[in-house]
Each structure stands twice: as C-alpha cells, then as structure tokens.
Image (spheres, coloured by chain):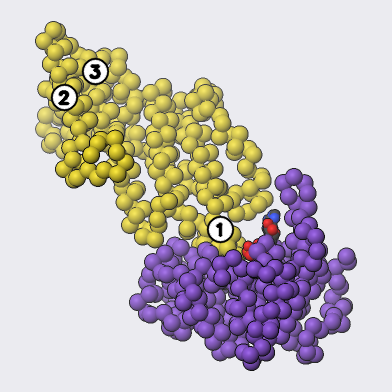
Chain colours: A purple, B yellow
Amino acid sequence: MVPGSLADTGAAPVLLDAEPATDLLIRLEKIHVSYELADGACKKVLDGIDLDIRRGEFVSVIGRTGCGKSTLLRLVLGAERPTEGRVLADGREVVRPDRDRGYVPQKYSLFPDKTVIDNITFGPEVEEFSLLTRFTPLFYRRRKEFRAEAMRQLRRMGLHGSDAKKYPDQLSGGMQQRVAIAQALVMKPKILLMDEAFSALDPGTRTGMQKLIRQVWRETNTTVLFVTHNIAEAIQLGTRVVVLAKDGAESSGSKVALDLRVPDRAEEFAEIAERVEAATGHSHLDEEE
Amino acid sequence: MSVLSISVRPNRMTCWVLSWFLFAAGICLYLYTAQKRHKENPDDRVVPTLAQLGAGIYQAAMNPDADEEPAADSAGQSALERFRNGMLWKDTVASARRFLYGLALLFPAVLLGLHMGIFPYFGVFFLRFILFFDKIIALSVLPILFIAFGIDELSKVMLIVIGVTPTIILDTFNLTKSVPPEQVVKGFTLGARDFDVAYRVVLKQIWPRVLNSIRLNLKPLMLFLFAGEMIASTDGLAYRIALLRRHMGMNIIIPYVLWVALLLFLVDLTMRLLNKRLHPWFREA
Ligand SMILES: Nc1ncnc2c1ncn2[C@@H]1O[C@H](COP(=O)(O)OP(=O)(O)OP(=O)(O)O)[C@@H](O)[C@H]1O
Ligand SMILES: [Mg+2]
C-alpha cells in the first residue's frame, strides 16, 4: 500500500456527518503495524486503519485484549511509528510525542520522585525553563504562578490542598489518576490520550472517575481518545465508539470493525452495546465484568 | 517452638543477644588465644594481648612514621598535633584522598551509563566495548598500568577506573533501561526536551538506585585501591599494613584492619542514611 500523499487529505472519505475540514484534528491514514517476532515471523497487529478524529470528540476505542488498542494510541502519541501509512495531527505528520497530545497511561502515570504539585508543575516548568535557566530569579517568580495554576487544577480534580505535598505512592490509585489527568490538562493539550486509565480502579472509584473525565471533557472542550476494554464504559463516556477487531484468521491484523456515533439518549445504549459486542467478535469481551 | 521454624518471632532481647553473640565470641576466643600463647612464650608477636594492642594503637596514632624525620619539637606538641602528625592520620588521609578520586571518577561513569541507556546511538557505540572491558581482570593489567603510567597516583586511580567503572556504567545503563517507557513518553507530552527527559525524569528517578549501586561497589573500589597501595606506594593504610607484615607488627596491623572496616562501615552508613533522607519517596525493591 502506498502511503497517502498530502494531496488526498482533503478528499478522504468523511466517516460521519460532513463537517468542516478544519475540525479535523487527528487523521490515521491506511495504518499498518506489524512486529517482527523473535523467530523471524511477522506478526500483524493493525491492518489498514483509517480514522479521523475531530476536535471536541470523545472517542472510545474498544476491542479484545491484544487487538492493538494500545498500539493505536501509541501511534497517535508518536511513541511508535507505523510500518505503513501515516498519522497526521493538525495536518502535520506525527513523528514523536509532544506537548500537543497529553497522555494518561494505566500504570506509571506519575513521576514517582516528584510530589503531586511538582508532578503537575513539571510540564509548564520544563517547557519554559531549560536545565540552565531554571536557576534564574525569573524561574522562581514564574514557579509561584505555575503552582497556583496547579492547585486550581488539583481542586478541580477533587483533591485537597493537603495532598499537594504527597508523593504518588502515598495516594490511592484513583487519586493518582486524578493527578495524572491534572498533569496532562495543565498543558492544555489538543487531545488527551487515555490508555485503560481507569482499568486498575475498583468499581466505585471507577464510576467517580468516569463522571470526572466526562465533566472535564465538557468544560474544557478538549478532545479525548479513550482506550478501554469495558463496553459499558466506552458507550457511556464516548460520543463515538470505535471497535477494533480481526476480521478473520488469527494471523491477520485488526481493522476498524465498527465506528458508531453514540446518541445522548440512554435508551439506545443497550442496543449499541449489543452491536459493539457483536463487532468485537467475542461474546465475553471482558473477563473481569 | 523450635529454632528451625519459619514462623517464630524472637523477642527484642533475644534478637539483641543473638546478633551480638558472634562478636563477643570472637573477642573471647581471641583473648583466650592471646593469653595462652603468651603463657607459652611471653615475647609472642603473632597474637598480641590487649595491652600490646593498646600500645600499638597509641604508637600508630601518636607517633610519626619511624622512617620519617622526627619533628624537631615533638615533645612540645599538643596531643591533637601529635595525632595529626601521627602515622595513622597521615595514612588515612593518603588513602582517603585516593578513595575520593576514585569516587569522583564514578560520576562520569554514571552519566555515561545514563546516556547509553537513553540515546540509542550512545548505546550501540559503547555497549559492546564496555561489556568486554568489564571482563578484564583489573589486577591482571596492573603491570601494564605501572609501565604505562608509572608507579605514582595515576596508575592507582586507573586501577580503580578499570576495576569499578564498567560495573557502574553497566548498572546505570540497566537502571536507565528499567524505567518504564510510559515515563519517557509522559515527559515528552509535557513539553520536555531530550535532555530534560534524561536528567529530570530518568536520572532523577534512578538516582537513589545509582547511589545504592555505588555504595555496593565501594568495597571493590577499596579492594583495588588497597591492591595498588600494597604493591606500589609510600603511604596509605594498605601500604602500612603491607610494610608491617615484614616486622610481624600484628599489634598495629589488627587495629589498622579494624579501622579500615570501621571507616568503610561509616561511609556506607552515611550514604544509606543520606539516600533515605534525600529521597523520601524511594522504596527499596
Ligand atoms: N514491541 C512489540 N513486539 C512484538 N509484539 C508486540 C509489541 N508490542 C505489541 N505487540 C503485540 O501487538 C499486539 C497488540 O498489543 P497492544 O498492546 O496494542 O494490545 P491491546 O489491545 O492494548 O491489549 P490489552 O487490552 O491487553 O492492553 C499484542 O498481541 C502484542 O503481543
Ligand atoms: Mg493495552
């Protein structure tokens, strides 16, 4: 497959409603990813993915374990390059992770050596001050402002001021993810990428976090790409659900098996859930639910 | 309740007694041997008595090296001055200086390991060579060092470089590699540049482990330092021990050995406490 040229960006099929092209934030073009295994064999993971993400969308990506959800997210991040095809963010090819795309992984989402407040101010600090300029008086003045902003984010995420001085391992899993979201949002990224960010949380905490992220998304107008293997979570949170699944032989890679806009009415959730479940090609997608 | 049970919990007193028992037994055995040997031969020098050890310590601490010119007015000196001119102090300073040189050379090693772990080009450039370098037995190149660098300080420092730095480089390299990739990606998404990620994300979080690794390598470092001093030196703790062997000066050798052990123990303890104090977030695996 020939990697798409810039010229066909505008002419690419629009998946859902026709909306102005400027709304386009992320575009995946004919993405193929395969890994070379130790025995020399080639393992296809993603096999021809085309996906457009528009500003303001909340896209849930769902699929069986091992179907390449995290790989897809890493491609959008720029932490990994596709074997074929390309990823565009705002029309420019993504080659490495940068401050435009925030990241909240499932594990290791915070810097263990920094306190909560330092974790949140890390981004603004490091962006404005290099290793050398951090020792100037201006740095200390700006740091006060960074901290004030960090405290605002912290409160918004439902944490207390007294948590600011704690280290990540002194926080519960839910609180850690709250801090991680604050840490990413403080950079005002164009898109927030979350990889099973709530999967390690207990059900009660998880529900709370789902409410929180939905609220944050609405208030800040960010775009969210949310990877999960929980169908209910995907449908309740997303404005759109993308299902990744293999369409045949076990050796083939995953394709977009379903790409649905989720209506606001909760009555239709059950029907959508059925379609999603069917599309994943597995009646029991999730072992834990 | 049996001694060979996994689930027993000895109480505090028992713990205290048990943990000091071997020390006490060792001292008793020593004193008994000394006393027995002195009964047979009052001039025995192999196992000195407490009194002889005391005299030896005093002599080492308060008197200058016998080979040196005695200071003109040694009688008029205060105890502190005499101690500072004494053999023990001078030897300790000489060895400590080399020790610090060696220690200082470990920091470039840490940076090299860090860069090798983070920057792929650095990694491929150095890794194979350092893996090989690591297998060289430092003592086996000692003659080469003496020929190449002479028998002065440089060759002793080079001995430490060859002996210890490859371990530190490889340790730091592995520690760097063990940082979850999420952390590096996270750094970039927060606007960090490559060097920010290297120093402020990765080095910062492996630093306590690096210090631990350095701490564990202090013993090899001392080993190479002592080897160098014993073979070619005119001062230093190991030089003294080697020299006194010729005179069977056990009454000074034994205090020297214990002194070195004590110093190393204190350095180790200080580093451990500092590590804990400076990195409250650090949990030893
Ligand atoms: N570096 C790699 N080398 C070889 N295979 C890889 C590599 N990274 C991922 N894979 C394979 O790619 C497939 C997709 O991995 P990925 O982590 O994207 O799945 P996932 O959908 O996120 O799964 P999960 O739900 O378990 O997180 C897996 O089968 C995995 O074994
Ligand atoms: Mg995954």
Q: Position of residue B129 (x, y in %)?
A: 63, 37
Residue furthest toward the top? B40
State which quadrant residue B22 falls in.
Answer: top left
Asked whether, in this view, residue A48 is left or right of residue A78, the answer is right
Total marks drawn? 3
Q: Residue at x 48, y 80 (%)?
A: A208
Checking the image for residue B28, the label placed there is: 2
Residue pictured at 87% horizontal, 82% vertical: A11
Disc 2 or disc 3, which is closer to the eye?
Answer: 2
Q: Dot 2, crowdedness within 10 Å: few (<14), some or many (≥20)?
A: few
Is residue B184 depicted above or below A226 in this figure? above
In this picture, is A35 found above or below A284? above
Q: Which residue in the protein does label 1 denote?
A: B180
Circles 2 and 3: CB distance less than 8 Å? no
Give the amino acid at mark 2. Cys
| Front residue of A269 and A195 | A269
Split into 4 quadrants, where in the image is the N terminus of chain A?
A: bottom right
Query: Rounded to the nearest whole Å, what is the CA distance between mark 2 and mark 3?
Result: 21 Å
Residue B191 makes an appearance in the image: no
Q: Are marks 3 and 1 on the same chain?
A: yes
Dividing the picture into quadrants, the one containing residue A190 is bottom right
In this view of the protein, which residue sits in the foreground, B178 or B123?
B178
Q: Quadrant of residue A260?
A: bottom right
Q: Secondary structure at mark 2?
A: helix
Whether labels 2 and 3 belong to a single chain: the reply is yes
Q: Is residue B269 above or below residue B147?
A: below
Residue A268 on image: x %, y %:
66, 88
